[in-house]
Structure formats: structure tokens, C-alpha cells
Image (cartoon, rainbow, N blue to C red):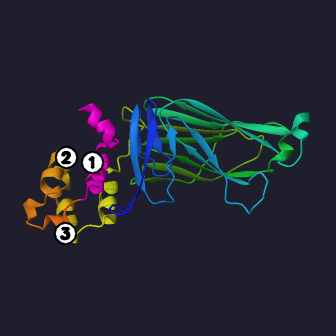
Amino acid sequence: DEDTGLARQIVWLPEGDWFDFRTGEHYEGGGKYAVYGNLKDIPVFAKAGAIIPLGPKTEWGGVENPEKLQINIFPGQTNIFSLYEDDGETQLYKKGKYCSTEFILNWHDNYADFSIKPAAGDSSVIPGQREYELVFKSVKNPCSVTVKINGENVHVNHRYDEKTLQLTFEQIVLKPADHLYISLKTMSDTLMEKLDLTEEKFINALMSFKLNTYVKRKIFRDYPEIRQNIGLLGRSFINNKRYRIPVIDHELKPAQAVALCEILKKRDIISLIEQK
């Protein structure tokens, strides 16, 4: 959009807990959301309990099964993901030349455990050992962490990011027959932590607007009040009488006002009107 400098896409999310795959931000399902970003940004959401493996970037046409995997784990529900792999080239899978690896998340209110089961089937189609990075999204920093490989306690490097609410386990090397078990516990009522990036998105959008810098500063300054009473946005800035700035040159354009409202309310403008 010429006035906002942003692309706008409408996304409908079914009932339940959802998370922005890239940022981990939490969304309550059951409605439409306006998502703002650059033209290259594609909204991708993960449902509670989702287990999503990602491999490293490969050269064009590569079919080898990866020696490294990043497993993204989202909170809120118990789930099982089965990773199927074959040689990627022939039809020998029809004769049983394939294997599958199960990733299991058992989710409870204040604790969770995650397992990587031994590969089942023909393990010759996968690497002799694989390095895993496990990323638990939108969780509290646990008070207790247990890691076992084949029933034996092991030390694994892990770090918690207070800003993104992500717990990451690095350089876990497993052979196809190995069994990994990780347990996370918290003293709080729930292990899930719902990340809210409303303020960050509001400010980023404001900075992208084709708008007088003075007006931007005023809106930024009054953000806490605006979030509590979105009506201030219309009265204070769209007509700009509050700041005695010429309306023609410096008023909030309709697309800009809509963008800020939708970011604050996490809904598209039509849904907001229908709620009235």
C-alpha cells in the first residue's frame, strides 16, 4: 500500500491456539486476522502442539536426506509427527526401502515431555547419525530439564531466549536406533507462555507509514493510552486538531488508521465492525 508501505493479507484461523511460525506470537483462533508485512512475507501459522521439522538449505535438485534437522515444537496440545524418508530417487519404497521416525509431544499444564523414537524400517536410507536442534516455542523458562538418550541421563547444551520465549537444545547427535527423551517442568500453572508482539508491530507499522515525523512521534508517545482506548486514535490523529497540524498535509490516511486499528485489535476491520 502506498500510504502504509506495507502489504496486508487476511488470514482465517479456526478455533484454538495458534502461533506465528516465524515469531512465535500467539493468536486466539475463531476469526479473521489482518497480517501486515513486506511483499516477501508469507503468513504461516502453527496450531497448538504442532511439530515441524526443517532441513538446511540445499543446492537445487538435491534429494539427500539431511544430516541436520531443526525440530520446531509448539505448546498446548499432545501430538505425534511421523517423519517419512526414502532414497528420494527410486521406487524401491514400494519394496519396503523406507523408514519413519516418530516425534512425540506429551503436553500437560505445567510440564511436557518430548521424544524422538528409534527409526522404524530400512534405516539405510537415512544418515548414520543425525544432528538435531530442538526449538520449543512460546514456553516459560523451565525450572527442571531432563535429557536422556537410550535411558541414560546426558548433558545437552540449551539456552532460553527471554525475548522470543524460545528454549533451544543444540547439537543433539543421534543414531537411527537411538531414543531421545526430554522433560520440561515449571513451578507455574502452565508451561505455555503467550507471546504478544502488538507494541512491536504497531511501532514497525508506524515507522513504515508515509507520515509526518512529528505525528509519528506523538502517536508513539501516546501508545499506552491508545492501546487502552483505540478511539483516541481517531479523535487525536485522524483530524489532527490536537496537534494543530494542517489536515491536508499530515493527517492519518484511512489505510494507515485501519492498519493501526487492526494491529491493536488483532482482527480485520470487517470483523471489528461486525462485533459492534
Residue 66 belongs to magenta span: no
Label 3: which residue?
Answer: 249
Would you say the residues marked 3 and 2 are in contact, meaning their CB atoms lie under 8 Å apart? no
Left or right? Give the position of 63 relative to 29.
Answer: right
Q: Which residue, given by chain and number where applicable, does mark 2 sit on?
A: 230
Residue 16 picture location, percent across and down:
44, 30
Range drawn in magenta: 253-276
Which label's residue is closer to the chain start, 3 or 2?
2
Q: Choose mark 3 or mark 1, whichever is in front.
A: 3
Horizontal and vertical percent position of residue 90: 89, 46
Depth check, mark 3 against mark 2: the one in front is 3
At 89% from the left and 41% from the top, the residue drawn is 91
Magenta-drawn stretch contains 263: yes
Q: Which residue is mark 1?
A: 261
Query: Which of the pair 56/191 is nearer the observer?
Result: 56
Q: For the C terminus, which image quadrant?
A: top left
Asked if residue 118 can be seen in this view, the reply is no
Q: CA distance from mark 3 to mark 1?
A: 21 Å
The residue type indicated by label 3 comes to Asp
Main SS of residues in magenta:
helix
Q: Which quadrant holds residue 201?
A: bottom left
Q: Quick one: SS at disc 1?
A: helix
Q: Nearer the viewer, residue 1 or 95?
A: 1
The residue tagged with tag 3: helix, strand or loop?
helix
141 left or right, relative to 130: left
Disc marking residue 21? none
Do callouts 1 and 2 mark residues in contact (Cβ within 8 Å)?
A: yes
Q: Is residue 23 above or below residue 45?
A: below
